[in-house]
Structure formats: C-alpha cells, structure tokens
C-alpha cells in the first residue's frame, strides 16, 4: 500500500455500501484470526458467517450523535477502522467510547492506527464537543503502551473480566483520553468544617 490514505466518517446505515460491509467483516475476521484483541476469542478461527451479522448489527446502529464509523482506505483498499459511540444520557453525554479499533493486516506498520486515533480525538472534540474518550483493552497484550503513544492513560481495570478460553482469564484495562484541559481543583490541606 503506497497511496496516501483517506479517512471517512459514516453516520447512518444507508451510507455504508454493501461492498464496504463485506470489507469490514473480512478485516475483522482476519485481525481476530491473527490474534488481535477484537472479539470472537472463544470462536477462533472465526468465519464470515459469524462476523458478518455482527458488522450488519453495528452498521444498523449508526447515528450522527451516538455511533459513528471511521474508515481508513488506501488505494481503494480498507486499511483500518474504528467506532466512536456517544451517550444519550445528559449526565454522561460529555464523554464517548472508542471500540473496534483495527488495522487491516496488509496496512500494519504504515501509520494507519496513528491516523485513526488522531482523527477520532479531533472529531470527538471539535465535531461532537466531547471532553474525554474511553476505551477498554484486553490485558496481557501490551495494548496499554500502544494507546499510550497517542496520549491515552490507564484509568484502572476490571480484574479477570475477560474469559478468553477455559484456562485464560484476562483483566479488562480501562483507558482514557482527556480532550480538553480541565483545571484541577485546589487540594484541601484539611477537611472543611460545616
């Protein structure tokens, strides 16, 4: 892949053509089968018959405010993708969640992940007015360092939350990205009196 990549947001099911849905399913299948922490862990190797209905369900839920699909292509080929999900509840509407981050196997090492992560942060901040983003990663995969290079920090984990196989249970690591600088409250040196 040598051509410059292009990025496009899809915000409604009718915007996603059938051919792209097929490419998303193929990418997801290939990444999962190659050991990527993208789901289907207990079904590997996974087939299109399993992945395609999940892609169709994901696309069916696209919404301009609550679920957007970001796709990277290069020379007409799918290079990577992710999903940005917002929150309808006003109490948590200031943050969004990034899921399904994937780089197609032939595009690995070409900077596609960097482009995807930069664009999702930009769009979340500038287009949606979000203050922060969250994502969860599978422990034991080294993904904390990968996302750390894009400014994400570990916020905590759910110990043993992911059952990968009968004898492989992993932590779910919680990560966050601040999109705006929020002044920290002054730390009190003593408890206030009421």
Image (spheres, rainbow, N blue to C red):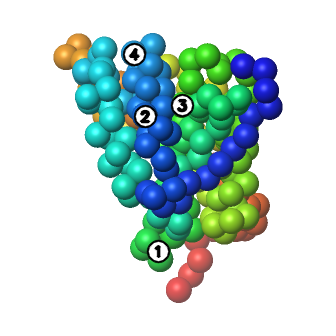
Q: Quadrant of residue 123?
A: bottom right
Badge 4 crowding class, 10 Å Cα cut-off, few under 14, some 14 to 19, many 20 or more, is some
Lateral position of residue 94 relative to residue 48, left or right: right
Task: Work out how far the residue at label 2 is from the one at label 4, CA to CA, in angstroms.
Answer: 16 Å
Residue 174, how many percent across, how many down?
Answer: 49, 41
Lateral position of residue 130 relative to residue 2, left or right: left
Task: Work out how far the residue at label 1 is from the one at label 3, CA to CA, in angstroms.
Answer: 30 Å
Which mark is in front, 3 or 2? Answer: 2
What's the residue at 25%, 21% (across, down)? 43
Q: Is residue 105 or residue 122 the one in the foreground?
A: 105
Residue 125, how many percent across, how many down?
Answer: 70, 61
Task: Work out how far the residue at label 1 is from the one at label 2, CA to CA, in angstroms.
Answer: 36 Å
Badge 2 crowding class, 10 Å Cα cut-off, few under 14, some 14 to 19, many 20 or more, is some
What's the residue at 53%, 66% (across, down)? 64
The residue tagged 4 is 33
Badge 1 crowding class, 10 Å Cα cut-off, few under 14, some 14 to 19, many 20 or more, is few
The residue tagged 1 is 91
Pick whichever of labels 1 and 2 is earlier in the sequence: 2
The residue tagged 3 is 102
Q: What quarter of the picture does the N terminus occupy? A: top right
Q: Is residue 155 or residue 104 the one in the foreground?
A: 104
Task: Work out how far the residue at label 3 is from the one at label 2, CA to CA, in angstroms.
Answer: 15 Å
**Contact flag, marks 2 and 4 (Cβ < 8 Å):** no
Q: Is residue 3 or residue 180 the one in the foreground?
A: 3
Pick whichever of labels 1 and 3 is earlier in the sequence: 1
Q: Secondary structure at mark 4?
A: helix
Q: Secondary structure at mark 1?
A: loop
């Amino acid at each position: 892949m040598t051509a410059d990549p292009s990025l496009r947001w899809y915000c409604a099911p009718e915007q996603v053509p059938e051919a792209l849905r097929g490419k998303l399913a193929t990418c997801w299948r290939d990444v999962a089968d190659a050991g990527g922490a993208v789901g289907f862990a207990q079904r590997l190797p996974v087939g299109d018959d399993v992945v395609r209905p999940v892609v169709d369900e994901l696309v069916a839920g696209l919404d301009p405010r609550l679920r957007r699909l970001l796709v990277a292509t290069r020379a007409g080929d799918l290079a990577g993708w992710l999903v940005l999900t917002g929150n309808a509840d006003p109490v948590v509407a200031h943050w969004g969640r990034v899921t399904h981050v994937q780089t197609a196997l032939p595009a690995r090492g070409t900077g596609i992940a960097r482009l995807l992560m930069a664009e999702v942060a930009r769009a979340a901040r500038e287009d949606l007015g979000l203050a922060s983003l969250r994502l969860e990663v599978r422990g034991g995969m080294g993904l904390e360092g990968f996302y750390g290079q894009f400014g994400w920090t570990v916020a905590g984990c759910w110990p043993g939350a992911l059952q990968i196989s009968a004898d492989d249970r992993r932590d779910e690591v919680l990560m966050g990205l601040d999109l705006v600088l929020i002044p920290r409250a002054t730390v009190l040196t003593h408890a206030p009196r009421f």
